[in-house]
Image: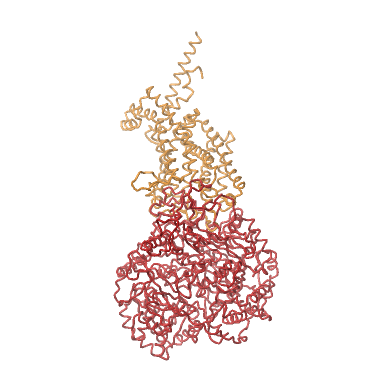
Chain colours: A red, B orange
Amino acid sequence: MHDDHHDHDEHEHEHGHDDGAHDAPVAPLPPTPEYGYWKSIRELQGQAPWQLDPATGRREFPTAPAEAEPVIDPMSRRNFFHLMGASAALAGVASCQRYEKEEIVPLARRPEDQTPGQTQEYATAWELSGVGHPLIATSYEGRPIHLDGNAEHPFIAGGVVPGTKRHAGATAFVQASILHLYDPDRSKAPTKERGKGSTMDEVRDALPAIAAALKQPGARVLTEASSSDTVRRLKNQLMSANADLQWHEYESLSWDSERAGTALAFGKPMRPIAHLDRCMTIVTIDCDLFVEHPCAVVYGRDFARSRRPDGALTAMPGGKLGDMNRLWSVESTMTNTGALADHRMPLRSELCLPFTMALDAALANAAGPPSAFLKDPKTAKWIEVLASELRDNRNKAVVIAGRRQPAVVHALVARINAAIGAPGNTLDYYDAADPNRATHLESMMTLAADMKAGKVKTLVMLGGNPVYDAPADLDFATLLQQVPTSLHLSDYEDETSKLSTWHIPRSHFLESWGDVRTWDGTYTLAQPLIAPLYSTLSVVELLSLLTGKEASGEHLVHDTFDALDSDNANWRESVMNGFVSKKPPIPPQPQLQDFGAKLQLTDSQRGDTKRGQGDIEVAFHFSSNSYDGRFANNPWLWETPDFLTKVTWDNYALVGHETAQVLGLENDTMIKVTVGDKSVEVPCYTMPGQARYSIGLVLGGGRTAAGHVGGREGKVPVGYATQMVRQTTGFDIALKASVTAVGKSYELANTQDHWDYRPGILKDVGNDGIQERIPGLIREVSNEEFTKDHSWTAEKNEGFFEDTGDFGKRNRPRGLSLFEEQEYSERHRWGMTIDLQTCTGCNSCMVACQSENNVPVVGRREVINNREMSWIRIDRYFKGPPENPEVVFEPVACQQCENAPCEQVCPVGATSHSDEGLNDMAYNRCIGTRYCANNCPYKVRRFNFLDWNKEFREARMKVRRLLFNPDVTVRMRGVMEKCSYCVQRIQNAKIKWKAEVRSGQHTAFVNPNAKDAPWDLMPDGMVTTACQAACPTEAIVFGDLADPDSRVSNLQNDRRQYPLLPEMYTKPRTRYLARVRNPNPALVEGGGKSEKKQEAGR
Amino acid sequence: MSSEAATMESHHAEAGKARETFRKVTQDVAWVAEAPKPHPLWLLALGIALIMFGIGIYSIYVVVMTGIGVWGNSNNVCWAWDITNFVWWIGIGHAGTLISAVLYLTRQQWRTSINRAAEAMTIFAVMAAGLFPLLHTGRPWFAWWMIPLPNDMGSMWPQFRSPLMWDVFAVSTYLTTSVLFWYMGMVPDLATFRDRNVAKGNKIKAIIYGIVSLGWRGSARQWHRYERAYLVLAGLATPLVFSVHSVVSFDFATSQLPGWHTTIFPPYFVAGAIFSGFAMVLTLLIPLRFLFRLQHIITQDHIGAMCKIMLATGMMVGCAYAHEFFIAWYSGNIFERFTFVSRAFGPFWWAYFSMVSCNVLVPQFFWVKKVRQTNILIWILCIFVNIGMWFERFVIIATSLARSFLPSAWAYYTPTRYDVGVFVGTIGLFLTFFLLFFRFAPVVAISEVKGASPEAHAGKGGH
């Protein structure tokens, strides 16, 4: 609630006056440190991160790693033989002959044949919760190994950095989805009679009966959200054949409240899509733009475009220096958006309605709603300043509400957007598909009611896992068992499959034809890259079987394509590109309707933010590790730490500091959350910036039939079944919950805060150290200073060394280095910049790197032992008061130092420099002294303490081995590894380029410095690292510093650039670009003081 | 005349007494190896040592077969007990050469009673130390890549800028020289053992001792050459006392890490090494001289002298601790300053203060003469010094790594049972060898003790 982080007196005063009659007094928060930076609440309080067990006292040896605990639980002998059979069947992966020959069209330059050992790229697409993701899949000799965004796609593609017109990022979920193709736990064969083994032949025999039953009364179809035109076409066919057939669509994380809200505002559901690149002011209400939103990748990119402080780079016409957007965020839990916001207000999700009403009223100069919390002078001023900024930035501002917020908030947001001139300028309303369908929750409730009433005789479920994620009070598991015939098509034999009379394995999206629409409605095609590994069916194939007219996926999609109004797009070309470039039309701006009658506030919403036990709000969050639980068997995602909590391998409840104190909850303990008559035990994470008396409950754990990784029957699952308290009332925001401590400690596997938090004699030693050094490590500047002071540079003249920066020149003085410095080639000098301004912390780079570089997964226990292997990590620190801190973050991978401390100390020369400036690792030369890691100031080296790839030698993992990138060595135990700047991609690009130049192509490119080797100068952008390709905002730019015009060269001359730890004289090739904050001057008091303090602290 | 005759007479009498004394020295040293049955306490000690050795072998088996992930080391604290133990053992190995070579060159004759045992200790300590650089590597079966072996693979050559390479040479040179020195010094005494066994008719023992005594006959020419060679080796070994631990300290001093990157390390490490070496000598000799009744050869004066050396080196070490703090403050470097404050008052404060109290406070007791004469007290104090010196290495290595430059990479370190197991195993190895040495080899340099005893100077006018 406090925007001003530097004014102690004010917020102490605030605490002074809200000692209501509710409950026990609240002890003061830990004081805001002088320079502001810290890592976690526990640390700030000077407490150990893990709970000390009162019975046993301090656990001095908590981490005894006896043997490597396998990431996934090992096989029983029985299962082993069971799966051996499947693996043997797999041996002929490409020999599955059931499918007719189909032609798919590669994007390669030489489509006529395939060169062995060369990768090929194909456009395809994937759908998550009804949102299409256009992709480029990299295939190695017939097996897909890596996914990227489709850089040609009209919606998601488009660069941020000048010179990169074509670029598309991909979310972490997209990057990780490829793992499921090769997951040995995937369902391989159908089952019948609720779990008995069956065969596809039996299914085919049974399908006509089910198809016939679908024509009878009592037939229901339940699907995941789908944007596929082919699915819709087949659905219409089925529906037209049976008037009684009811079609339900359900997603546990749904954006339907936006549909409902726009229906309220305009009379019909619309889909708003903002153009953040045209915005000067962006306001989010309980909404995460950068990870959770269906447009996350596009919003990230557009945000980055208008976020760059150099006005010339914005999409805004006539932009000037200092033109950058300002992000305002109101939310109950700290999200990536809140972390980037210039102004953030933590607010109970439930109170976002009165807040939005107040903002609406302020814009209309009317009186706001009578909510007590709005009377707080700070809140009032916040809203006033925001309203005046929105008025000033008319036509250049937008407000976006999140999926949890009720329809009225979305309707109000539509009204506010209309008032600030957003539609047509910064916001377009597209027609929503299926305008007449019920919302996901209503649809599920209707279905459940019918099932309860015994009306449902045949239930076909296409994807989804309602037994796990339907509202808990519906008790879908019981209802499903009462349905005489149920059929579940899914990738895994999951909770729902086990209770369905039939389960049919679904083809992975890389095995099947399909079509999706991106959030704006662009028609996007998905082609298979591999024949189905098992006898599986795709959704469209099953639907076609159910219509009685069996057709191949290709035919089905082709038929849909032919019926499309697509300006006569060519099928072959469209498949190759992966989309039909005809943009969906933007309908005329809809007319606002009056919905004032719906604006009713509850008593709770009229109250203030101070609550007590039994009046706690629970806001349900997606998990950045498993989404809503569907990725529960994905070890890559489980091990990628959540951006803000840095927790891996778990889900948890996010509890604010004050809430925790009043309710007696502590970090790393188990707590019991009770909503209505249901309760769940879950670990507690004390989250800075969490709204008072609001708990963020992360979904997606506690799966009982996910697989060897995520949990299966009889095994301890990953995480906790938080969905058990999610009910039809309060599906997204549950009220009147109570939260109590259970009295058990629980250690969360945290990659950052657990890396020490045992206080010493002076508990502030660590805190002081952090505060002192972060301003030097993560440089920030206010937009005001950046704009006014043209001499400001992020890289201060430290005066440590007389380094003229002419690295690479011959005969240069040794400088202050002990040894003669390495000489670098003038042909290529690889370098990277990472822009802290536009990094949204979406974790895409982490998963992309894992996929590209065969980075092993170590499991929960070993993460606790600080042995996670990620080559790139995102450091995250907080700044300011714990109840509403700022967040600073910094992705750190190998800095590729020119003067690398690691190289000097390796006794066998296993790590040494290439003349292009890469700090190379020769894995097979490494003997594992780990001296290099000790001497690395950035701590980016990762050691294989145990054989992390042991499980791949199991027979059942044979299929999983197909995913390995053959260009990257799989490291054995005892070997050091680290980021290589994707050296395999560099070499491949160089070889390719050289071959092309030699064969007479590209005559325009001649390097004047190397006439004998004209291929030396490669066009900028030919090499992209995996992290760079995945980054939606192009925060990571890689290229050749030898080319003075390359993007990376330009960025390394930017005044925002600075190296990490320059005083070490490592001369890193990776440079950072300082973060520019853009607070509204009207809300900054004493900000100048804080800047000075930061300077002094450096 | 009469007075002259009287002098002659007394001279003869003294010479006879001296012969008697010399024989007794030989007798007293040799009985240890000649006693048909070992002392039961010796057997008990050997049993315990073998059990510890066994634990070590099992732990090493697990470490090599499973990977060093069974230890507590992490990506942040990459070195912990492994290198701590290495440096500790190397330090212990310092007293031997110091006593043999430096004190020999400086004519400190009191050394003769203890130098043999101290040299043996050096060798066994360096053996124990040598295990760690080998075991701590991720792939110990490739550790031989650190040796510059000519090969036909072009650039497959060690990287000589790495202090770990310097370690390889420093430690192997030290071990070689120490073994030579020890063995050469032992040759006359082994010959004595041979002769005694020949006299007693112990054939097998006589043959074994005969082989290892290399045909020593004790002729004047052999003695002449022996003395020359001994002097040359002492001259060679003396710089090694200072170089080995200096080089080991370069592992840390040449790195970038605050808390490691310190120019004071070479002298500081050498002083610490001598300190811990003497502590270990006393820890072993005090019970063994009692056990084998060598109190009149290894006298209280000798023990007192060693206590004084410990007092001196202990204060040098203390001085270094203070100096490190001063420099950290004086440097104005925030990372440096933080490391030291955090070391003393941060999460590892208990290790830091264990180190300071054991290494700086405990030796202060040696100011008191009464303490220097009470063996049980000395023994207890020496145990503390051994612990303190272990903590010194742990504090330097682990606490610096635990909180390095980027706070996101801060960690805590906790050992596992395999960390402890390997360490216990090396203690077992050390003790086993030492006990065997005590039983089967001349534990005191018989010839040198004779040369240094007052009786040897009896003929020189009452000196």
**Which residue in the rendered view is the most extreme toward the bottom?**
A243
Is residue B271 positioned above or below A466 on the image? above
| Residue positioned 31% across, 32% down in the render | B204
Residue A577 percent location from the top left of the image? 41, 74
Which image quarter: residue A1010?
Answer: bottom left
Which of the two residues, B196 or A831, is positioned nearer the viewer here? A831
Quarter holding the N terminus of chain A is bottom right
Residue A234 percent location from the top left of the image? 40, 85
Q: Is residue A360 left or right of residue B132?
A: right
How many numbered tags mark residues here?
Answer: 0
Which of the two residues, A769 or A576, is positioned nearer the viewer here? A576
Residue A861 percent location from the top left of the image? 46, 61
Q: Is residue A331 left or right of residue B118?
A: right
Residue A677 percent location from the top left of the image? 54, 77
Which of the two residues, A74 or B365, is positioned nearer the viewer here? A74
Is residue B134 positioned above or below A707 on the image? above
In the rendered image, is residue A851 in sight?
yes
Q: Is residue A1039 left or right of residue A1078?
A: left
Which of the two residues, A862 or A167, is positioned nearer the viewer here? A167
Quarter holding the C terminus of chain A is bottom right
